[in-house]
Image: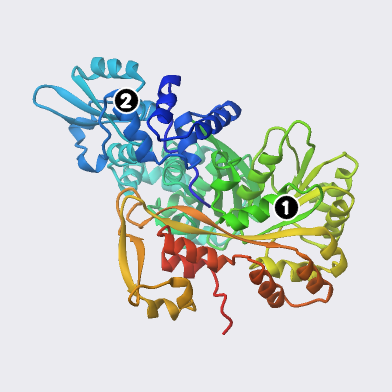
């Protein structure tokens, strides 16, 4: 999924916003557009200008620094010493998004701030530190990264060791651990004992440390797995799993119980899977965790999906669509009736695309109903229904009820069977706009998937407006991005046409991240969306009626201008926003072999 969090949290007085136009950084129309967006969303004008691509972060900060008489800097020019960081408490640094950088011999403390208009905090810092304050301006993202690195110089391994040493090893071994023989047998757990072990301070600290580190590292999932002699903790960051520091094996049962208590699950039940939710507060915002507990041989495995709604309800042009694909998507999204299919594997950003589309369509004069399993995010103004098969509430039964609720737009979380597909098609053919998802490899394959379910070709041809397939690729870290040249032959062997590469003297300039603290030495920061949008035109509808294979539909789609997932990835590769390795990892070749 693309990195959509704002890099600034700045508001501007009216005089400064008008200066943006006077100095030629914005047109009057662009400023009016941004102010209109601010009026609707209540966001900060600085964040809006950058998120809409009207100004770069560097342009905005340089302008702001000039107007406020504060120098704009990159924090890479500072070394954050412990004695300097100790002058300002971490809680204040995080609350006001600032960090002390250095102190001169004449008692002047240089502080990097993200909001130079907040002069009150500078007076507070003078009182706290007893020093004169010299402010410099830096981006919020750089300051937060410096805070995470500077104030948390202690590694995750050292933090866990410290927590373990705080506990009485022998007592905890008795209360918490089950020896290997006991774990291999069916044991009736003492619920009171489990609750006691889960409430021990070290266990609570361990769970809190795992959760807080995952949020700080922008992980999408947390995996806690048990093996015969160890626990493994992994975070999925930008779509790839990374192993992290893990507690000793003896704490596994207590940690599992602690997480179950937080998710309101049955702590005594270890034989069947369980699902629950946890709500936590991190960095001043509420974050939901979707918890899945799976019984395995050495012990229960826990996966927690981190659901941060701040990336939802964005403008469609911020998701990463190519202009041609976005035009087709918007046309189908604003149609009066028909079905729009969103496809892709789990974790490909389908929820973000769906919720963003619904948020753009959500107006007081529109009745929107959704049926989901589960309801991941709650959207104001939209009626959302949670599937409950045990109570007889399935996708199909919910859809039948929807048709009696006078809907304008219906969203079906997933079309899993023929019954659901038929009701959705019936809704589309009777004047409703329907959004739903499928699990297929690309857009043309969705037609084959519906046929395999048993949906008649004439119904598919009549009801479906558009099929969109998507993937997410990691984007190159902007802080350590560097160019390099490669021979065109090394790319052609990956089934990339020389015509698409447009080489100069047999060479192509590409980019990669060499690794830095900002990207945790990975070379990547955030993700970008790849979108393959197939519009069902008359030629394609004819192919569907003739039961043509997906490969034929794909050929016609490409002739009509459809950009495949590989073509979108290639564009981003040549633009310098992703790497060859990511393109090959995420997308398949369009050249038949």
Mark 1 or mark 2: name the one nearer the start of the chain: 2
Whether residue 229 is visible, yes or no, is: no
Report the residue at 56% width, 79% height from top.
591
Residue 102 as seen in the image, left or right of residue 10: left
Report the residue at 50% width, 54% height from top.
528
Judging depth in this view, the residue of 56 and 399 nearest the camera is 56
Report the residue at 57% width, 75% height from top.
590
Residue 217 as seen in the image, left or right of residue 196: left
Q: Secondary structure at mark 1?
A: helix
Q: Is residue 279 above or below residue 243?
A: above
Image location of residue 512, percent across then percent down: 35, 61
Report the residue at 87% width, 39% height from top.
405
Q: Residue furthest left?
A: 105
Q: Quadrant of residue 115?
A: top left
Q: Disc 1, disc 2: CB below 8 Å?
A: no
Whether residue 466 is visible, yes or no, is: yes
Q: Which residue is mark 2?
A: 67
Residue 115 as seen in the image, left or right of residue 469: left
Judging depth in this view, the residue of 480 and 282 nearest the camera is 480
Image location of residue 335, percent across then percent down: 77, 49
Q: Is residue 207 above or below residue 327?
A: above
Judging depth in this view, the residue of 216 and 553 nearest the camera is 553
Q: Which residue is mark 1?
A: 332
Q: Is residue 210 above or below residue 328?
A: above
Q: Secondary structure at mark 2?
A: helix
Of the 4 image quadrants, the one containing the C terminus is bottom right
Judging depth in this view, the residue of 387 and 418 nearest the camera is 418
Image location of residue 454, percent across then percent down: 84, 69
Residue 407 as seen in the image, left or right of residue 359: right
For residue 197, which numbered disc appears in the image? none
Q: Residue furthest bottom?
A: 593
């Amino acid at each position: 999924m693309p990195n959509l969090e704002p890099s600034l949290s700045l508001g501007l007085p009216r005089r400064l916003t008008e200066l943006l136009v006077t100095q030629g950084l914005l047109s009057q129309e662009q400023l009016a557009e941004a102010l209109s967006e601010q009026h609707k969303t209540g966001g900060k004008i600085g964040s809006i200008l950058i998120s809409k691509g009207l100004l770069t972060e560097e342009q905005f900060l340089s302008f702001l620094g000039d107007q406020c008489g504060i120098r704009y800097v990159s924090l890479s020019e500072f070394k954050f010493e412990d004695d300097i960081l100790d002058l300002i408490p971490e809680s204040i640094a995080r609350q006001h998004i600032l960090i002390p950088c250095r102190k001169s011999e004449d008692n002047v403390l240089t502080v990097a701030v993200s909001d130079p208009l907040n002069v009150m905090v500078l007076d507070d810092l003078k009182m706290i530190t007893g020093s004169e304050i010299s402010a410099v301006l830096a981006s919020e993202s750089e300051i937060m990264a410096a805070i995470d690195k500077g104030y948390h110089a202690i590694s995750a391994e050292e933090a866990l060791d410290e927590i373990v040493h705080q506990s009485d090893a022998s007592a905890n071994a008795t209360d918490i651990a089950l020896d290997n023989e006991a774990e291999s047998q069916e044991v009736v757990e003492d619920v009171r004992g489990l609750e006691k072990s889960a409430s021990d301070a070290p266990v609570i600290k361990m769970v809190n440390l795992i959760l807080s580190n995952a949020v700080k590292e922008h992980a999408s999932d947390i995996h806690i797995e048990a093996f015969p002699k160890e626990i493994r903790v992994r975070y999925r960051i930008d779509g790839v799993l990374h192993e992290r520091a893990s507690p000793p094996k003896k704490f596994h049962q207590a940690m599992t119980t602690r997480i179950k208590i937080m998710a309101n699950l049955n702590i005594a039940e270890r034989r069947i899977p369980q699902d629950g939710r946890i709500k936590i507060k991190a960095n001043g915002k509420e974050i939901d965790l979707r918890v899945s507990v799976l019984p395995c041989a050495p012990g229960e495995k826990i996966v927690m999906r981190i659901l941060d709604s701040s990336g939802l309800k964005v403008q469609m042009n911020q998701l990463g669509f190519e202009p041609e694909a976005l035009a087709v998507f918007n046309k189908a999204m604003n149609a009066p009736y028909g079905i729009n299919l969103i496809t892709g594997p789990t974790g490909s950003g389908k929820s973000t695309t769906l919720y963003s589309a619904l948020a753009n369509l959500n107006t007081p004069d529109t009745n929107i109903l959704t049926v989901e399993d589960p309801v991941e995010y709650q959207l104001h103004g939209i009626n959302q229904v949670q599937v409950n098969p045990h109570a007889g509430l399935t996708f199909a039964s919910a859809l039948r009820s929807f048709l009696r609720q006078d809907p304008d737009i219906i969203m079906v979380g997933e079309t899993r069977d023929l019954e659901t597909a038929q009701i959705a098609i019936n809704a589309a053919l009777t004047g409703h706009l329907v959004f739903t998802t499928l699990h297929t490899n690309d857009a043309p394959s969705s037609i084959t998937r519906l046929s395999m379910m048993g949906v008649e070709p004439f119904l598919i041809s009549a009801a479906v407006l558009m099929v969109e397939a998507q993937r997410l690729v990691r984007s190159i870290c902007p802080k350590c991005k560097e160019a390099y040249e490669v021979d065109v032959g090394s790319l052609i062997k990956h089934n990339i046409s020389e015509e698409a590469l447009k080489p100069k003297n047999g060479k192509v300039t590409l980019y990669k991240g060499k690794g830095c603290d900002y990207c945790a030495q990975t070379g990547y920061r955030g993700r970008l969306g790849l979108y393959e949008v197939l519009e069902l035109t008359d030629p394609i509808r004819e192919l569907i009626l003739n039961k043509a294979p997906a490969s034929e539909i794909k050929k016609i789609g490409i002739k009509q201008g459809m950009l495949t997932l590989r073509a979108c990835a290639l564009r981003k590769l040549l633009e310098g926003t992703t790497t060859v390795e990511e393109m090959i990892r995420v997308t398949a070749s369009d050249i038949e072999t």
